[in-house]
Image (cartoon, rainbow, N blue to C red):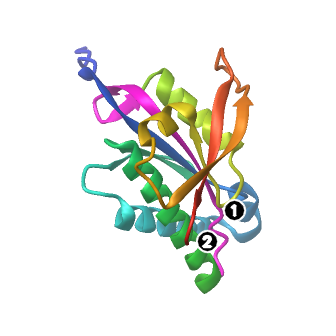
Amino acid sequence: MTVAAPPETRVTHGTVVFTDIVGFTEYTALRGDDEALELLSVQERLVREELPDEARIVKELGDGLLLWFRDACEAVRASLRLQERFERESSESMLPLWVRMGVHSGRQTRRGDDLVGHDVNVASRVVDVAGPGEVILSEATLAQVDDRLPDVSFEEIGPVVMKGIPEPVRLYRALRENP
């Protein structure tokens, strides 16, 4: 028996965004798999339409997506645009596309097409803090954004203790100034 070689790994730096559809499990239980799959398809279509060229969908994670961006500003901009698109789609199609998003910048290890590492894990915990329609980002992301997004304000949530993360992470809610 031949064992396949492990995927090649390399370190990269960028911003990771996790999306998560709020209430998806209950929606699936009440409406069935076909309607749940339609909701997932709409989320993916909208994400693909809004991603800048240098960003990508890394993978699907049940009712969420793992996205990667080279630039933190692009990640925050795209996340806020997506929230507007999700809200508009929800009201027009009557689909409950209530998505929360978590954003964290740092170092990732690319393993084949996948991303792993501590900073990916932090991003996966940041999304858990967000409510429907919110974009929550870490202090590490805010430091990279600095003052390059004059049309976005950041409301401090505070240091948050998150499962499996040794130190509290200071988090911020991104808000578009003039939607």
Q: Residue at x 72, y 64 (%)?
A: 27
- Residue 151: image location, x then y, percent: 49, 61
Residue, far bottom: 92
Label 2 crowd bin: few (<14), some (14–19), many (20+), radius 10 Å: some
Q: Residue at x 28, y 18 (%)?
A: 6
Q: Residue at x 45, y 41 (%)?
A: 146
Q: Vertically, is 42 above or below 126?
A: below
Q: Earlier in the sequence, mark 2 or mark 1?
A: 1
Q: Tell me the amino acid under the disc marked 2.
A: Glu
- Please give the label number shown on residue 35: 2
Q: Which residue is mark 1?
A: 28
What secondary structure is the magenta-colored segment mainly? strand
In this view of the protein, which residue sits in the foreground, 21 or 86? 86
- Residue 160: image location, x then y, percent: 72, 30
Q: Tell me the amino acid under the disc marked 1.
A: Thr
- Residue 94: image location, x then y, percent: 66, 81
Tell me, yes or no, whether the two marked residues, 2 and 1, touch with CB atoms within 8 Å.
yes
Q: Is residue 77 left or right of residue 35?
A: left
Q: Vertically, is 145 above or below 162?
A: below
Assign a secondary structure to mark 2: helix
105 falls in the magenta region: yes
Q: Quadrant of the N terminus?
A: top left
Q: Is residue 126 left or right of residue 54?
A: right
The magenta stretch spans which residues? 94-115
Q: Quadrant of the C terminus?
A: bottom right
33 falls in the magenta region: no
Label 1 crowd bin: few (<14), some (14–19), many (20+), radius 10 Å: some
Q: Is residue 145 left or right of residue 40?
A: left
